[in-house]
Amino acid sequence: MEENYRRVKFSEVFEEKSEGALSPKVPIEINGVNFVAGTLFSKGVIYGGIDFHLYMNRDIAIQNSEVEEETDGIFHIVGFYKE
């Protein structure tokens, strides 16, 4: 990934709920679709073009911004690392 991205652990962004759903801990945006913290992502269902369960435990590339106001506190997911 390029240097204008920040690498974060999957567990910093998502938590796994007891029923197996994933939920973002922070507001996220992926492929132009925004999700608020607490949204539930069920396994096998596509959200913003992604089944997040397929990327569990992979590090996530977050768009890095020099100016905090540009992100509005939203983690802009740009990809997932293979290892």
Image (cartoon, helix red, strand yellow):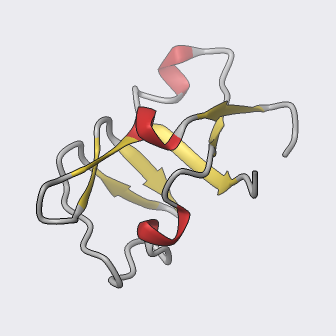
Q: Please report the residue visible at 36 percent of the width from the left and 55 percent of the height from the top.
A: 34
How many numbered discs? 0
Asked whether, in this view, residue 47 is left or right of residue 17, the answer is right
Camera-side residue: 58 or 31? Answer: 58
Q: Please report the residue visible at 50 percent of the width from the left and 62 percent of the height from the top.
A: 32
Considering only vertical position in the picture, is 12 above or below 77?
above
Quadrant in the picture for residue 7: top right
Q: Please report the residue visible at 61 percent of the width from the left and 15 percent of the height from the top.
A: 67
Asked whether, in this view, residue 6 is left or right of residue 48, the answer is right
Considering only vertical position in the picture, is 33 above or below 45?
above
Quadrant in the picture for residue 40: bottom left
Residue 33 image position (x, y, % from top left): 41, 63
- Which residue is situated farthest in the left direction here? 19
Residue 10 image position (x, y, % from top left): 50, 43
Q: Please report the residue visible at 53 percent of the width from the left and 51 percent of the height from the top.
A: 57
Considering only vertical position in the picture, is 39 above or below 69?
below
Considering only vertical position in the picture, is 49 above or below 27?
below
Asked whether, in this view, residue 80 is left or right of residue 47, the answer is right
Camera-side residue: 64 or 39? Answer: 39
Quadrant in the picture for residue 61: top right
Residue 65 image position (x, y, % from top left): 66, 24
- Which residue is situated farthest in the right direction here? 2
